[in-house]
Amino acid sequence: MLFNSAEFLFYFLPITLIGFLFLLKQQKSNLLVAWLVLASLFFYGWWNPAYLILIVFSMVFNFNFGKLLAAKKRAKLLLGIGVSVNLGFLGYFKYTNFLVDQINTVTSTNFSIETIILPLAISFFTFQQIAYLVDAKRGLTSEYSFLHYALFVTFFPQLIAGPIVHHKQMLPQFKAVQNVKFDYMNIAIGLSIFAIGLFKKTVLADGIAPYANDVFAQAEAGESISMFVAWGGALAYTFQLYFDFSGYSDMAIGIARLFGIVLALNFYSPYKALNISEFWRKWHITLSSFLRDYIYIPLGGNRLGEFNRYRNLMITMLLGGLWHGAGWNFLIWGALHGSYLSIQQVWSQYCPTVSIIPSTIKTILAWSVTFIAVVYAWVLFRATSLDGAVTLMSAMSGMQEISLPNAIYVRLDALHPIFETFNITSFLGGGSNFMFNWVWIMFGFVIVLLLPNLQDLFNAVRFSTDKFSYRTNNAVSFVSLINNINWQPKRRWALMAAVCFSLGILTLSQVSEFLYFQF
């Protein structure tokens, strides 16, 4: 069941919310939690009821192992068993087919197994529960009932694609859910956030998606691609992925707020980042935090010398790449980001800042280098094969051809001498598609660079459990509008939400899945 489907919008969500408000009024605390758990399990089982067995087993196993770990008896051994069982299930469903293919390639054998279908959300609820087990061993968990723990794992707004919630943020809220008072503000805030997220997904992400799909399809087919067309496709995907995944995260936060629950922030203007570390602090924040707290720091972080710091960065990002998918593209994507982070560390340590360069120029250069590096890496993330990724990346580097659609080329008479100098030619057809692609890209830049993100827009009414705010950080000087726009419970904001929701509803005839559902 998709957030942008008629079944969810007109049946599941209203029925679940009405039942919740009824039980809240009756002060039936255990029934209230049980209602949300049952609704969440129904939501998860909508795709494939068989996988309910997996998630229920996972909850029962990890809850009881968490209790054993909290008792401190053979905790190290038990933690190893608990983590191994979780990773074993994840590895079987996510990586078995890939490993068999690699064995066949290396050994020239012909082993075959049936294609294993990846259960929805297994990566998300597995990491969530591994964090719970580790913290139970550290003595950082409290005593909770199984019902509250089940809601922590299955809560339907964040179940399928995050945010990856942490027990210390969520379990106290779920334990106190019976104390939630009906508040029209929660409804107004939740619906407004959900409507904006729906608009991001259905209008922005799905609107720009065809331009990315066309170019990546050409790359997979091995066709020659112009540098400008290649960059158009890569940038189209860059914005599609952001609007799709951040749209989902916003919708999840908005839905949770309807029930009086505040979720963690998952995005905070990552495309405004001035270095790659800042990018990862603001892109898929809950995954970045997990990788930092449960992989990078336990490996030693930056405490054991420079070599070990770079090794730990590389291991962490390689595992982050593999978390996203079983394939060489994801592994190389993780290695590329590990290299980015290492290069940034070396640069910041050994390359002095040039004081004669104006700060504005430094900001623009830092942003440009970071953004271009991220876009290049997204090609590996999106391409369905390594050959397709190499084809597109070589085209982006100008190694195939540099040309413009003829309809555009002939209208740029004044630039023809420059075109001839750099051997820029023309090709027939595709002019209108090329133009619309770049119009979408310019529109994307305006939104991600100049408009406020939702964390700042809803800052006064607590958008998330986090406290990021550009209002107290002026590092990105070209962001000029964020101090002038604030959400308020007024008619103009209700109208804005209604317009966003209405535009989202118009797309119900062409419902598309969220990109992160594949992970």
Image (spheres, rainbow, N blue to C red):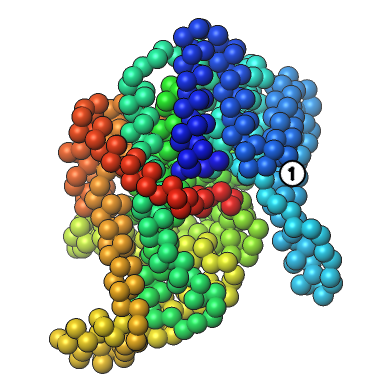
Furthest residue in direction front, as rendered: 509
Mark 1 lies on residue: 89
Q: To which quarter of the image does residue 50 belong?
A: top right
Instruction: Please indicate whether residue 470 sits to the left or right of residue 48 in the image.
Output: left
Q: To which quarter of the image does residue 357 belong?
A: bottom left
Image vertical order of residue 133 relative to residue 376, above or below: above
Q: What element carries label 1?
A: helix
Image vertical order of residue 474 relative to residue 19, above or below: below
Image vertical order of residue 365 relative to residue 261, above or below: below
Task: Count up the numbered dots.
Answer: 1
Residue 230's spot in the image, x, y percent? 41, 74
The N terminus: image quadrant: top right
The crowding category of the residue bearing disc 1, from other C-alpha atoms within 10 Å (few below 14, some 14 to 19, many at least 20), is some
Residue 413's spot in the image, x, y percent? 17, 87
Q: Which of 375 and 69 is in front in this view?
A: 375
Q: Which residue is drawn at 33% across and 33% down?
A: 192
Q: Residue at x 45, y 36 (%)?
A: 9
Q: Is residue 375 visible?
A: no
Q: Nearer the viewer, residue 399 or 507?
A: 507
Image vertical order of residue 487 relative to residue 327, above or below: above
Instruction: Please indicate whether residue 161 sits to the left or right of residue 79 in the image.
Output: left
Residue 184's spot in the image, x, y percent? 33, 19
Q: Residue at x 71, y 55 (%)?
A: 95
Residue 37's spot in the image, x, y percent? 60, 24
Instruction: Please indicate whether residue 250 sits to the left or right of residue 338 in the image.
Output: left
Furthest residue in direction left, as rendered: 414
Q: Which residue is drawn at 26% across and 32% down?
A: 494
Q: Which of 219 and 65 is in front in this view?
A: 219
Type of amino acid at the residue the image marks with label 1: Phe
Q: Is residue 16 visible?
A: yes
Q: To which quarter of the image does residue 388 belong?
A: bottom right
